[in-house]
Amino acid sequence: MTKNQNKAGWHLQNSYAELPALFYSKMKLHPVSSPKLVKFNESLAKTLGLNAQALKEEGQIDILAGSQAPQHAEPLAQAYAGHQFGHFTMLGDGRALLIGEQITPDGDRFDVQLKGSGRTPYSRGGDGRAALGPMLREYMISEAMHALNIPTTRSLAVVTTGEPVFRETELEGAILTRIAASHLRVGTFQFAAQWGTIEELRTLADYAIERHYPEVASHESPYLSFLQEVMKRQASLIAKWQLVGFIHGVMNTDNMTISGETIDYGPCAFMDTYDPDTVFSSIDVNGRYAYGNQPYIGGWNLARLAESLIPLLDENEEKGLGIAQDTMSDYFEIFQGYWLSGMRSKLGLLDQEEGDSLLVDSLLDLMRKNEADFTNTFRALTIEKFEGMPLFETDQFKHWHEKWQERLTRQSRTQDEVFQLMKKHNPAIIPRNHRVEAALEAAVEQADYSVMENLLAALSNPYAYTKEQDDYCTLPPSTDGPYRTFCGT
Ligand code: AMP
Ligand code: MG
C-alpha cells in the first residue's frame, strides 16, 4: 500500500482481531477479475471520513472488491452460531470478510465488511459469493431504513466482480461494502457459550460492553445490565419495524445484533395491506417470522442471549438461570411501551390516556377488516385526505375518526403541533416491493441505474411529504399471487 493510495482516508483498526482466536479465522483476499463500481454512497463515505473522489478512482475500487487490502487491514471471517428457524447450528461468515474498523473523524468505530467476497472456513457448501440483485436490494432497503430513522447497518458501495455466480441461473457477481456499529450477534454469544471457555465468553461480553454499552462496565452486575440494555435496544428496534410495517423475514439469532441495528437484508420487505399474518419469504412456510410474530421472536432470540450469559450472571447455575428468566420476563412490557409510544406519535398524541391502547387497537382492527394499506392509512390521517380506500367509506371508520378527534381536542395542542408530530412518524413513502423490483430489474437486466437512483432520492427523506413523492405512494397493481422474497445467497 503506497502513501498515495491512502488519500482515500482509511483509518483502520482491528480490535476484533484481538479477541481469542476461536472467534475468527484470519483470511487472505480472493481477488476478482474485473471489478466495476456500480453504486456508491457519497454521504456515508463522508461520515466515515473517506474521500469519495479518491475511493472511486481506479486502484481504490480494488479495495471495495476485496482484491486489495487498504492500509492496516487485517481481513478476517467471524465465527458465530445461531438458531435458524429454531434449529441451533454452527455458522460464521461464509461469504463475508471484516477488513477492519474505520475510525471516523468524530472518533466513532465502524466495521467495514465485504459481503460476497469469497469462500471462508465457514462457507460449508456455499461459494462465498453474492449476486448483483440481492446486493443492490440490501443497499436500497438498508439506506431506506436509515432514512426512516431506524437503526441499521448501512451500505457504502456495490461493486460487480466481472465473474458469474451460479444459482438457478447464471447471475452477475457483486460485493457489497457493509458498514456496521459491529457485527456482534446473539449468535456470537451462543457460539462462545457452546464452544468457548467461560473466560472466552467473559472476554467477548467485556468487548461488547466496551464497544456498545460502556456505561454498564461500572455497574454492580455489568453482565446483567448488558443483557437488559441489549433487550431494550432490540425491543425499541422491533417496535420501530412494526410502526412502519417492515418485515425482516429471517430473524434467526445470527441475524440479531448486539448493537441494536437491523442486519441482514435477505428476504425482508415492507407490508402494503395491513395483515399481521403477512409473510413474504418463500422459505418461511410456517410464518414463524410473520409481521405479527416479530415482537415474540425478538423475545425468543433474546432468551437465547440470556441463556448464553448464564455463567456470567452468577457462579451458581441455578441462580444464573433465575436471573436470566427474571430479566426476560420484562421484555414484552418493554416492547409494548416503545410500541404504544410510537403509535401515539403516529396518531398525533403528545400525552397519555388510559384509553389510548383501545383507540389504537380499534383502528388496526378496522384496517385489517377493510384490507387497508398500512402506510397510506397513516399518511391519510396525517394530511387529512380520506380518499381512495374502502376503509374511509365505512361508518365504523367515521365513528373511530370522531373518537380520535375528541381525543386530540382533550390534549389541547395546536393543529400544527399535531401535524408536525404525525409527519415525523408516518412516512409518506416506503420502499414498496413493486418499486424495488422495478429498480432492480432496470439495473440488473439493462444496467440502467436511473430507476434506482430516483427511488433512492425519493426515499432519502420519507417524511418530507413533497409533491414528487406522491407518485411513489401508489399501490402495486393487483396480481395473481402474493409477493415473494428469497434469501440473497
Ligand atoms: P444469511 O442467510 O445471509 O444470514 O446466511 C446464513 C449463513 O449462511 C451464514 O453463515 C452465511 O455466511 C452463510 N452463507 C450464505 N450465503 C452463502 C454463500 N453463498 N456461500 C457461503 N456461505 C453462505
Ligand atoms: Mg446472516
Image: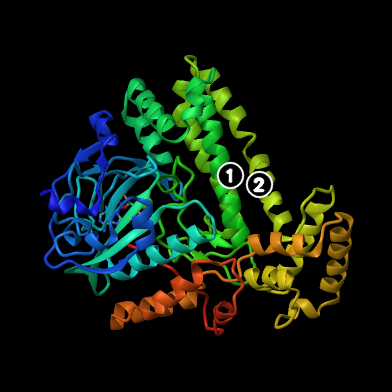
Task: Pinpoint residue 349: horizontal percent, then vertical percent.
Answer: 77, 55
In this view of the protein, which residue sits in the foreground, 434 or 166? 434
Q: Is residue 117 left or right of residue 264?
A: left
Task: Pinpoint residue 22: horizontal percent, then vertical percent.
Answer: 25, 32
Q: Which residue is mark 2?
A: 338
Residue farthest along the top direction in this orientation: 315
Who comes first in sequence, dot 1 or dot 2?
Answer: 1
Question: Which amino acid is tagged 2?
Answer: Tyr
**Element at label 1:** helix
**Element at label 2:** helix
> Residue 177 is drawn in which quadrant?
bottom left
Tell me which image quadrant ligand 1 sits in. Answer: bottom left
Q: Which residue is mark 1?
A: 235
For the question of whether residue 391 can be seen, the reply is yes
Task: Pinpoint residue 57: horizontal percent, then vertical percent.
Answer: 19, 64
Q: Is residue 313 left or right of residue 358?
A: left
Residue located 59% across and 62% down the image: 245
Question: Which amino acid is tagged 1?
Answer: Ala
Crowd tier of the residue under label 1, counting other residues whose Cα lies within 10 Å: few below 14, some 14–19, many 20 or above: many
Tell me whether circle 1 and circle 2 mark residues in contact (CB < 8 Å).
Answer: yes
Cα distance, mark 1 to mark 2? 7 Å
For the question of whether residue 487 can be seen, the reply is no
Residue located 73% across and 82% down the image: 387
Specify the quadrant that holds the C terminus. Answer: bottom left
Residue 354 is labelled as none
Query: Does 344 appear above or below 202?
Result: below
Task: Pinpoint residue 338: horizontal percent, then vertical percent.
Answer: 65, 46
Q: Is residue 30 left or right of residue 174?
A: left
In this view of the protein, which residue sits in the foreground, 423 or 484? 423
Query: Does 369 appear above or below 10?
Result: below
> Residue 193 is drawn in which quadrant?
top left
